[in-house]
Every structure is written in C-alpha cells, then in structure tokens.
Image (cartoon, rainbow, N blue to C red):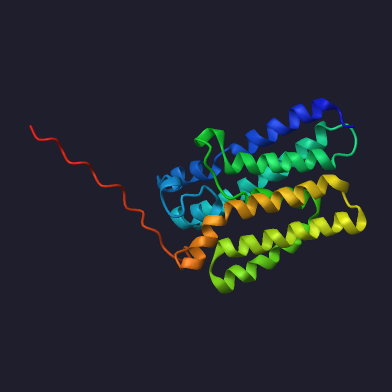
Amino acid sequence: MNDPWGWIIAIPAAYVLGAIPFGVIISRLFSGVDVRSTGSGGVGATNVMRTSGVKAGTLALILDGTKGAVAIGIAKIVADGPTPELEAIAGLAAMAGHNWSVFIGFRGGKGVTIGWAALGVMSPWAALATLVGAPVAGVSRYVSLGSIIGASAGLMLLAVQVLAFDYGGNGYLIYAAGGTALILWRHVPNMGRIIRGEENKIGQRVDLRPPPTPPTPST
C-alpha cells in the first residue's frame, strides 16, 4: 500500500489546485466581466471565450489543463511506489475542485479540460480518443455536446485499456467511471437546453450589458 502521507498530501493539494478559478480571474482581467453572471455562468474556457474573447478563453484553457496535469504529477511525486489509485483519486479531486471551488462559493465549471489533462498524463492514447468530440462540436455547433462525446470516448478507452490489458489496474478504472459520471452529471442542464433548442452555439454572442442601475431614491 502506498505511504499514507502521499494520500494526505496529494488529495487536498489536487482539490485546492483544481479550485483555483482561473476563468473568473482571467475574464475580470481581460474584460472586467464576472464570467459567472454572463453566458452559461460557467467558469471554464468556453464561457470565458464567449464572454471575454479568444485570447482570454485560450489562456483559461491552458491554465485549467495545467491544473489537471500538475495534480497527477504531484500524486506521482509524493507516492511511494506505483500510483494508479492515488492518481485516479487526485484527478477526481482536481475535477471536484474545479467544479465546486471553495474560493467562489462552491461554484465552478464542467471539469472537461482539467479532466482531459489529467487523463493525458494517465493515458495519452485515451486523451487522443477524446478528439472525436471536435467534429461533433463543429458540425452541431454545440461545444457541450462535443465535450460529452469526446470525454466519454476517452474515458471508455481508458476502461478498455484497464479491462483488456490491465493498464493501471483498478485505479484507472476508478478514474474512468468517476470521471464519466462527473462530466455527464455536470452537463445535465446542457443536455436539457440542447433538447429544447436553447443551448448557446459556437460563435453565438452573449449579452454583456451591465445590470440596470437602481433608481435614485427621491429626496
């Protein structure tokens, strides 16, 4: 069994790292917008790009991905011996931190980018499999639909690697199951909006008008 200190260090570190709200910080710096109150209300790269521009969204994408990769890196560094179980729980903790950040009232994003980066450290082939979501998003113009399809494909391939080739053992199977559940759960509202035809599409502008000024009290 791994040194318990590895778990004591890696799991909280992964959550706190994942909880850093880069999307909120970047959108404020680039456009002065609170990304939580515009567009979809999410703090991920898609909503940052939609509300604050391509450069801001790209930066948010890179930094959110870095959180996932670093979380797995920390698990590898502090563990004693092979780390599949610790990597899996650290990856899920980082996703949980991003989705329910302690720094912004336990709100957050969908966990796709941070989960993808963590997956890439565990299995580059599984991370590549997620790219099937790109044409889905391109054709449908729904980023959320592409994210659901891509993430599911990658995590399913990771599960196949575990079950067919014992790649990572049960540890990586935990990540495949837990990651799929988290991403699908967080996208339930998006799926509902897609069915109703209300989901924002790629290239669609959002209303960034400031809230109305309250009336001045009469004297």
Residue 6: % across, % down: 80, 29
Residue extending farthest to the left is: 219
Indicate left or right for 107 with 11 as reference.
Answer: left
Q: In the rendered view, tell whether residue 46 sits above or below residue 171.
A: below
Residue visible at 57% across and 40% down? 100
Seen from the viewer's position, the closer of residues 22 and 159 is 159
Residue 1: % across, % down: 90, 32
Q: In the rendered view, tell whether residue 3 sits above or below residue 136.
A: above
Residue extending farthest to the top is: 5
Residue visible at 55% across and 50% down? 44
For residue 202, say whether it is visible: no
Looking at the rendering, in which quadrant would you find the C terminus?
A: top left
Q: In which quarter of the image is residue 76?
A: top right
Seen from the viewer's position, the closer of residues 83 and 163 is 163
For residue 103, say whether it is visible: yes
Residue extending farthest to the bottom is: 139
Residue visible at 84% across and 33% down? 79
Residue 180: % across, % down: 69, 53
Residue visible at 65% across and 44% down? 95
Numbered-mark total: 0
Indicate left or right for 61 with 156 as reference.
Answer: left
Residue 102: % across, % down: 55, 33
Indicate left or right for 125 with 92 as reference.
Answer: right
